């Protein structure tokens, strides 16, 4: 994957940091590539440890768009990336500034795609280009094939074939990125609770032996919210008795890969990445 335009140690990139380890790993990757990284960290989401991995950090609340733009401008940032999720429940606790209120007033709806697209457009109008969140991911984006010692069993393959198109339709409706299947029946669909919550709910309904399928939306914009998994999902699967995790290659970020694979092998969980469907937006760099 291309590393983008030529750069020097003085090249500045903005990092909008949400929840999880991905923002930290991404910041370290950018620093290793010679970038000067300025972070806008979202309160109640970003890990406080992000400050140690960047050259500067400004903490903002979700919805403080004007403050975000001002911070990036002061840092000399003209390209930025989003890394890490923002829990959808945060939408019910928004404290937007004037620029955020104006953006929301213009939005026809409050779906993820609408709001994130509007934020990207507003950043662009202020001289800050939002680039793909997978542009510098490198080894965090494994190719097709099984990551674990065990590949999916025949039963799990049947569940994968059954569940994959359903997961795509659910993701396309902006409900969630994951479904949990057992014996070719959908047991749980991810919503506000996230993938790990859906896995736990599936165990309560159907017991062990479930298969988890996580996909990107059919028209996923790689600047926003690409599927991400880490060791915590394997822990959740182990506790729930889930036996297989299927992901899409080239669009799914696998964090702490060695730890994830060790945990999956210990639990007897198969983790497989399947080639993503052809898509004009999939895996490419933003134009």
Image (cartoon, helix red, strand yellow):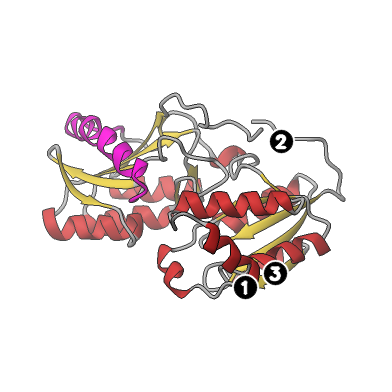
245 in relation to 146, above or below: below
Viewer-nearest of discs 2 and 1:
1
Earlier sequence position, callout 3 versus callout 2: 2
**From the viewer's perspective, is the residue at label 3 or at label 2 nearer?**
3
Residue at left 64%, top 49%? Answer: 121
Q: Which residue is mark 2?
A: 3
Tell me the quarter of the picture where residue 55 sits: bottom right
- For label 2, the SS is loop
Distance CA(mark 3)–CA(mark 2): 29 Å
**Residue pointed to by mark 1:** 97
Q: Give the class, few, some or many, for how many residues have Cα within 10 Å of label 3's Cα (few <14, many ≥20).
A: many
User: Residue 270: horizontal and vertical position, in percent?
Assistant: 31, 39
The disc label shown at residue 67, or none: 3
Is residue 169 one of those drawn in magenta? yes
Residue for point 66% across, 54% down: 122
| Image spot of residue 226 (x, y percent) | 49, 45
179, 263: nearer the viewer: 179
Q: Which stretch is magenta?
A: 151-175
121 on left or right of 69? left
Q: Which mark is residue 224?
A: none
Q: Main secondary structure of the magenta part?
A: helix
Q: Earlier in the sequence, mark 1 or mark 3?
A: 3
Percent coordinates x, y for residue 80 in the rendering: 69, 51
User: On the rendered image, what quadrant is the C terminus found in?
Assistant: top right
At horizontal 44% and vertical 24% (from top left) the residue drawn is 278
Res. 119 visible in picture: yes
1 or 3: mark nearer the eye = 1
How dense is the environment of label 2, judged by Cα within 10 Å: few (below 14), some, or many (20 and up)? few
Q: Are marks 3 and 2 in contact (CB under 8 Å)?
A: no
């Amino acid at each position: 994957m291309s590393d983008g335009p030529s750069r020097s140690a003085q090249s500045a990139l903005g990092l909008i940091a949400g929840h999880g380890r991905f923002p930290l790993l991404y910041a370290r990757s950018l620093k290793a590539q010679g970038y000067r990284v300025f972070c806008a960290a979202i309160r109640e989401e970003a890990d406080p440890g992000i400050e140690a991995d960047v050259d500067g950090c400004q903490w903002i609340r979700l919805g403080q768009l004007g403050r975000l733009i001002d911070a990036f401008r002061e840092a000399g940032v003209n390209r930025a990336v989003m890394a890490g999720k923002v829990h959808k429940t945060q939408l019910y606790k928004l404290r937007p500034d004037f620029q955020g209120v104006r953006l929301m007033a213009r939005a026809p709806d409050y779906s993820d795609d609408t709001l994130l697209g509007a934020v990207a457009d507003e950043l662009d109008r202020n001289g800050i280009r939002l680039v793909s969140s997978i542009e510098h991911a490198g080894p965090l984006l494994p190719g097709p094939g099984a990551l674990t010692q065990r590949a999916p069993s025949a039963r799990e393959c049947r569940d994968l074939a059954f569940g994959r198109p359903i997961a795509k339709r659910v993701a396309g409706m902006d409900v969630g990125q994951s479904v949990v299947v057992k014996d070719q029946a959908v047991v749980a669909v991810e919503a506000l609770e996230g993938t790990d919550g859906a896995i736990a709910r599936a165990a309560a309904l159907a017991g062990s032996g479930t298969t988890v399928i996580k996909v990107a939306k059919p028209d996923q914009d790689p600047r926003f919210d690409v599927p991400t998994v880490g060791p915590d999902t394997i822990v959740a699967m182990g506790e729930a008795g889930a036996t297989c995790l299927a992901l899409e290659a080239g669009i799914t970020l696998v964090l702490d890969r060695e730890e994830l694979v060790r945990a999956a092998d210990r639990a007897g969980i198969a983790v497989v990445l399947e080639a993503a469907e052809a898509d004009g937006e999939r895996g490419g760099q933003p134009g």
